Amino acid sequence: MKNNKIEISSSYLLKFLGITAGILILLFYGSSLLLPVLFGAFIAVLLQVPINFLIKKKFPEWLAMLVSVLLMIVIFTALFWFIFAQLSLVAEDWPAIQEKGSKKLVELSKWLKDDFGINYQNYIGDGQDFFNKIKNIVLQTLSSFSTVLSQMFLTLVYIILCLMQKRMFVGFFMRLTTHEVGMSEILSASAAVIRNYVLGKGKIMLFLFGIYYAGFALGDVRYALFLALFAALFSIIPYIGNFIGGGIAVIFSYIFAGTSSAIFVFVVAVIFVTQIIENYVLTPWIVGDDIDLNPFTTIFGVLLFSTLWGVAGAVISLPVLGVIKVILNHTKGLEAYAYIMKIK
């Protein structure tokens, strides 16, 4: 009788589990050190686009770097100012929002209890508790972003170092193997994944912001600019972000209009149609197959990195997974791991 069972070395399995556990521990406890490095490296890759453009226009390399970095600082400063300006407007009206929301929650609870026998207080407490929980979630999210912002100067230092020492880093990776062509392909493919994905998502976020704002403004939705900005920004988090951004818009429209209002129906319709456009038109057209990760890998990766690094981890998860897939796909003996991450 033939033995059809495969053989797996126990020592190999133990090494694999030990290395995996070590990497996860390093990522968790080294987040304050690794996040600025990763963000710095990724942004440095993005800045190569304007740097190469300026060099083609006969700019010296040092001047092209300087102009690109200054342009980045101006764009990020304007973006953060705009975000916090919108947040401050909502924060000023928070007591009124909380009061209106509590009344709407009472109406909702009565409807659920009368028609379905569901008492929401068993799950979320009273209205004040519910809105306090929402406030805490928002504060935790902002805290995660503020952690990155607090390290912005360090990230800027890493960006400049990556740009200035680019040849040294490339030389280091080339010396890690005797197969220089393969390593060159890994570096170029990894840079292309980061660049195309981030720039593609940036374009999609701009499209979403325009569509959301036009729709909300047309429907005379209160805080239309804030809700459009919030929904567009959170779309950078795969799957989860769309639910968060769209959900906040629906909650605000319900608080100020109610489900029977045409405004509420209009907001839900705008969000639904926009999500269809993003998922079936914008993402395939703009991002395409640059990441090429199947849904299981995408969701698992987002959850893993968000557990390790919070919201910042969720944002950076797909580019990191894309680079990992490139490395696995170009490393002999590890192609199977790249295969299980692909869509097809």
Image (cartoon, rainbow, N blue to C red):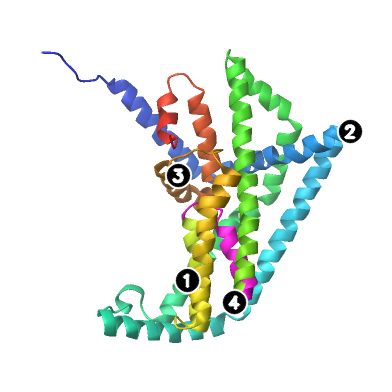
Question: Which quarter of the picture shows residue 228?
Answer: bottom right
Residue 44 visible? The answer is: yes
**Do callouts 3 and 2 mark residues in contact (Cβ within 8 Å)?**
no
**Do callouts 3 and 4 mark residues in contact (Cβ within 8 Å)?**
no
Question: Helix or strand or loop: what does disc 2 sit on?
Answer: loop
- Sequence-first disc among 1 and 2: 2
Residue 142, above or below 60? below
**The magenta stretch spans residue 232:** yes
Which residue is labeled 4 in the image? 219
| Residue type for callout 2 | Lys
Which residue is labeled 1 in the image? 134
Q: Give the range drawn in magenta.
A: 217-239
Q: Distance between the residues labelled 3 and 2?
A: 41 Å
Question: Helix or strand or loop: what does disc 3 sit on?
Answer: helix
Question: Helix or strand or loop: what does disc 4 sit on?
Answer: loop
**Do callouts 1 and 3 mark residues in contact (Cβ within 8 Å)?**
no
Which residue is labeled 3 in the image? 298
Sort mark 2 into few (<14), some (14-19) or many (20+) by Cα contacts within 10 Å.
few
Percent of width and height locating residue 246 = 51, 65
**Do callouts 1 and 2 mark residues in contact (Cβ within 8 Å)?**
no
Q: Residue sitting at 44 percent across and 50 percent down? A: 307
Sort mark 4 into few (<14), some (14-19) or many (20+) by Cα contacts within 10 Å.
some
Residue 87 visible? The answer is: no
